[in-house]
Image (cartoon, helix red, strand yellow):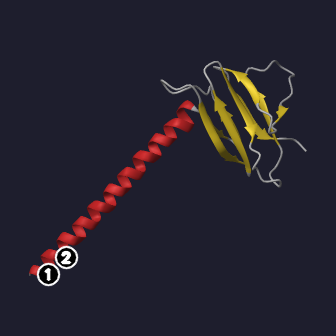
Amino acid sequence: MLTSALIHHVCRVDVNVALTCVIIWCQAGGFLQSVWAGYGGVRLVNGTLRLQRPRLPPNCTHLGLRHVSFQGALINVHVEEARWGVALDAASPSGAPRLQVAASDAPAGKRPQPLTTTQLVFEAGTSAAVTRANP
């Protein structure tokens, strides 16, 4: 009888520890998701990486999202108070497809710009879309 009670107690502790770890990981995941999707404005919509009005979290001077993986390429997003920018990371694989960026509020007829390691800068409060460049 003592053995089954001890096994039950140990198993219950193990389940509680595992559950606690799951809760902690979920909380960390929720926090990170609020940063990249909320403040960073990162959305994946129909094969397009949308950067919807990236903005700073309260009491922050800048926000950096490094190595955002899209279509096999690595992208960096940098947000400041008055502007934000996007660039291809220097560590992006050479075999990754070429990408382009189009501002959501761009005038009709303005062509998307190629995404390179040189940062493309946008005004705060604007959005842009990253897509695979046409061959």
Q: Tell me, yes or no, whether the two marked residues, 2 and 1, touch with CB atoms within 8 Å.
A: yes
Q: Nearer the viewer, residue 38 or 88?
A: 88
**Residue that numbered label 2 is attached to:** 7
Image quarter (top left, top right, bottom left or bottom right) of the C terminus: top right
94, 8: nearer the viewer: 94
Crowd tier of the residue under label 2, counting other residues whose Cα lies within 10 Å: few below 14, some 14–19, many 20 or above: few
Where residue 97 sits: x, y (%)?
82, 49
Q: Does residue 83 appear anywhere in the picture?
A: yes
- Residue sitting at x 22%, y 66%: 12
Q: Farthest left residue?
A: 1
Residue 130 placement, left or right of 4: right
Q: Which mark is residue 71?
A: none
- For numbered disc 2, what is the local secondary structure? helix
- Whether residue 47 is visible, yes or no, is no
Mark 1 falls on what kind of element? helix
Q: Residue furthest right?
A: 135
Spot occupied by residue 70 in the image (x, y as percentages of width and height): 70, 46
Q: Quadrant of residue 64?
A: top right
As measured in the structure, the alpha-carbon distance from the residue carrying label 2 to the one carrying label 1 is 6 Å
Q: Quadrant of the N terminus?
A: bottom left
Vertical relation: 122 (above or below) 28: above
Q: Amino acid at mark 1?
A: Thr
Q: Position of residue 112 (x, y in %)?
A: 83, 30
Residue plotted at (58% across, 25% down) = 55
Would you say 73 lies left or right of 39 here?
right
Where is mark 1, residue-wise?
3
Q: Residue at x 62, y 24 (%)?
A: 80
Point 19% across, 76% down: residue: 7
The total number of labels drawn is: 2
Q: Name the foreground residue: 100 vs 122.
A: 122
